[in-house]
Image (cartoon, coloured by chain):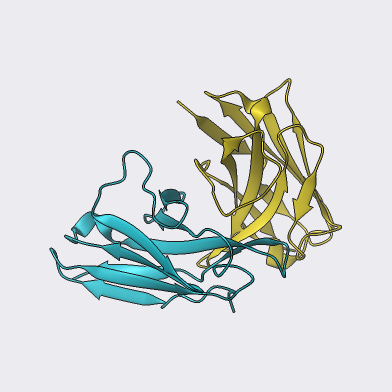
Chain colours: A yellow, B cyan
Amino acid sequence: QVQLVESGGGVVQPGGSLRLSCAASGFTFSSYGMHWVRQAPGKGLEWVAFIRYDGSNKYYADSVKGRFTISRDNSKNTLYLQMSSLRVEDTAIYYCAKDPRPTVATITGWFDPWGQGTLVTVSS
Amino acid sequence: QSVLTQPPSASGTPGQRVPISCSGSSSNIGTYYVYWYQQLPGTAPRLLIYRNDQRPSGVPDRFSGSKSGTSASLAISGLRSEDEADYYCAAWDDSLSGVVFGGGTKLTVL
């Protein structure tokens, strides 16, 4: 079955950097676009970024543009989120999620399934 | 403030039908599909409804979705205690060039 497992979360100081990973299994990773979605403690969901199945196009929420970079290694079935210039307001659980439509370039609000998430805490 | 507007809370007794609304605009719900997610306490969200009114396999037919104009609605019929969760709507937004979510609705089963 499809499985997404995030890792790399932790505590980091404001202005610092962190790289999250999402290991995918149970499907042909190279055929599907992937997303990062985050949830601040006690708050709602916020879409962060999307990367096309072949890595050729990337899209970001305005709140992270210029600070976060989404990437993927299709040979390792792994999705990444490189986060830099971190702010206190970036504190959240970060989920990776699969776009269920193969080889598409457009983005919808369709995420299925989601990983279990990894917690990033930005604090001094 | 979230781009999509949901009531912060909803409630019902077992067996009841409970609707949850999601209001948007022409740049999101008015043009694009709506998706609904259920988040049980302490767990990751899961897809409940896709493309306005379609249920993934494994989702009970007690859950139904609809869309009209710039608003959408999730209805839960035959309410059960295990339906107690947070529910979110989502859609693509042209003006923001990104996916937008509703603020979430916390459903309580009395």
Q: Quadrant of residue A54?
A: top right
Residue that appears at 31% across and 68% down: B107
Please indicate whether residue B18 sits to the left or right of residue B25 in the image: left
Residue that appears at 55% across and 46% down: A117
Q: Is residue B43 visible?
A: no
Residue that appears at 41% across and 77% down: B8
Looking at the picture, does residue A4 appear above or below residue A85? above
Looking at the picture, does residue A53 appear above or below residue A67? above
Which quarter of the rendering shows the C terminus of chain A?
bottom right
Please indicate whether residue A5 sits to the left or right of residue B53 in the image: right
Which quarter of the rendering shows the N terminus of chain A?
top left
Which one is in front, A12 or A29? A29
| Number of numbered discs visible in the structure rendering | 0
Task: Give percent across and percent down for residue B16.
Answer: 16, 68
Residue that appears at 29% across and 56% down: B63
Task: Give percent across and percent down for residue A32.
Answer: 64, 33
Find the residue positioned furthest to the top: A75
Q: Quadrant of residue B15?
A: bottom left
Q: Is residue A111 visible?
A: yes
Task: Give percent across and percent down for residue B92.
Answer: 62, 60
Which one is in front, A16 or A77? A77
Which one is in front, A56 or B88? A56
